[in-house]
Amino acid sequence: MSNVSLNRRDILVGGMSTGLALTTAAEAQAESRATLEDALRQRRSTRAFRADPLDAALLLSLAWAAQGVNRPETGLRTSPSWHGAADTRLHLADAIGVRLYDPVEHAFMDVRKGDIRAVLSPQPFVATAPASIIYTSNVAAMPTDAPRGQKQVFAMVDAAIVAQNVYLFCASRGLGTCLVGGVDSAAVQAALGFDEQSVVTFVQPLGWPA
């Protein structure tokens, strides 16, 4: 897994320079396009997307809204989690490959090349979105004395909290999204080489509404 090179002039995603200005965590926090009330009014699920690729800087801002560090002095994030486990991991799958968002570095990390969107879900519209978030939980980060079943329940709760942040960000920017529970977990596990400590919870396609 390698860190995607990012600097103030360019953002390098999946090995392709976009020539777009980098959105830092501070800039992402300041880039509000709507009030919270506006975003709540506009929040909805979208299942039809245009094919247009999503701007790399926009995706980085979205990732910060989802679970970025909003208190640098403590490292705490925009989304809470059970026992502060911060177990939810946000992978982004698109035509280029799969990347993992690192909240501390505010950067995407390359995980693998190749398009896996078609195997994410039996729901056909998921594969038509230009990008999809794959939510996984690192259950090893949860309290060690918790039963496995309890960890799996809270893995889904924590991911759903992050997903609501994504919904509100998308509503504020005019993007479409939809949280999907019908995930082909075995296919995702195989494609990304996850071990038993990684629980696949949801996918969330993203794109401009058709």
Image (spheres, helix red, strand yellow):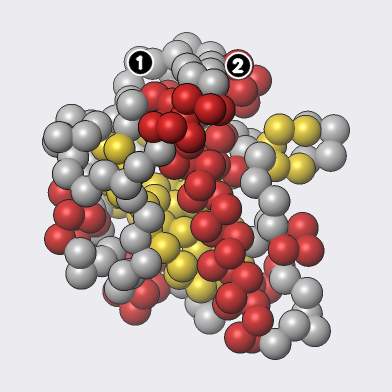
> Is residue 130 toward the left or the right of residue 17 in the image?
left
Tell me, yes or no, if residue 206 can be seen here: no
> In the figure, residue 46 lies in which quadrant?
top left
Marks 1 and 2: CB-CB under 8 Å?
A: no
Query: Which residue occupies 80% across, 84% down?
Result: 145
> Can you name the residue that lies furthest to the right here?
73
Q: Is residue 134 above or below residue 5?
A: below
Q: Is residue 18 above or below residue 48?
A: above
Disc 2 target residue? 30
The one nearer the camera, 51 or 166, is: 166
Q: Position of residue 198 (x, y in %)?
A: 53, 72
Q: Mark on residue 19?
A: 1
Find the distance from the CA under tag 1 to the CA under tag 2.
Answer: 21 Å
Q: Amino acid type of disc 2?
A: Ala
Query: Which residue occupies 44% across, 52% down?
Result: 91
Q: Position of residue 25 (x, y in %)?
A: 62, 26
Query: Which residue occupies 75% across, 83% down?
Result: 146
